[in-house]
Image (spheres, grey):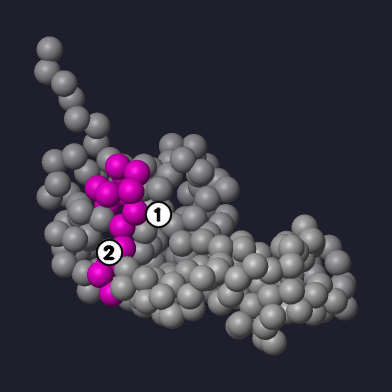
Amino acid sequence: MIATTKTTNIWIVDDHEVFAKQINRLIAAEPDMECTQHFSSAGDLFEKLQFTRDFPDLLLLDLGLPRRSGLDILPDIRKIMPNSKILVLTASDDREKVYRAICNGASGYLLKTADPDDIIQGIRDVIDGTSALSGPISKMILDGFSRYGPVEAIEPLTSREEDVLHHLVRGLIKKEIADELSISQHTVDMHLRAVYRKLHVRSQTEAVSKALRQGIV
């Protein structure tokens, strides 16, 4: 009896039609992979997710999407299809975006400038349960740990402070955080002041950077 190889089902979320077609052809050339869906926006993706539970093995996600960015929708995707792997494939090598993507559940982060063979290998690595990082991204992360030294001990955050910080890392503004948590903006400000004090920072950017660097959220 001949053993059959399971075909990896891949979806692409990318508004750059030409690049998406290139990746589709790249995947189609592999005997054990297929791209069954392509979405140009977060709205298109979530419309599909309303009517199916036949989720992909892996989702290739661009961050630079119109209206709702890949970073914004990443936590929602993880909730809806927790067993699917998410591999970010994007043009941005912004340090904060890299950290936020990984902390919010991405299994890897590849740049669109990566060699096609490296993209295919990255897909295989993620499906096999390991991570995939483009060379420059891997170096950035290692340099970041080296530059900032050992993780500092901080005063523990309350559960509500962690909630506020988590939404801050997602990129929400104070009003949106208040709406999400059903509290007033004044209460959000109060929790943020406590977060800043405990993390020894003075701004939202510093709070997000430190939270990601130290794995607080």
Q: Is residue 87 above or below residue 34?
A: below
Q: Is residue 48 rendered to the left or right of residue 142?
A: right
Residue occupied by mark 1: 107
Instruction: Name above or below for residue 169 compared with residue 80.
Output: below
Query: Badge 2 is on which residue?
Result: 20
Closest to the observer, 210 or 51 = 210
Q: Amino acid at mark 2?
A: Ala
Q: Nearer the viewer, mark 1 or mark 2?
A: 1
Tell me where residue 26 appears, x and y as whole percent: 16, 56
* Residue beneath the point at 20% across and 54% down: 121
- On the image, the x and y values in percent for residue 47 come to 52, 53
How crowded is the residue under tag 1: few (<14 C-alpha within 10 Å), some, or many (20+)?
A: many
Of 87 and 95, which appears nearest the observer? 95
**Extent of the magenta region:** 123-137
Q: Depth check: 178 or 144 in front?
A: 144
Q: State the count of labels.
A: 2
Quadrant placement of the C terminus: bottom right
SS category of the residue bearing label 2:
helix
Question: Residue 78, how many percent across, how many down?
Answer: 52, 50
Q: Residue drawn 31% across and 63% down?
A: 133
**Residue 108 visible in the shown view:** yes
Q: Which residue is drawn at the image coordinates 60% and 71% (left, top)?
A: 152
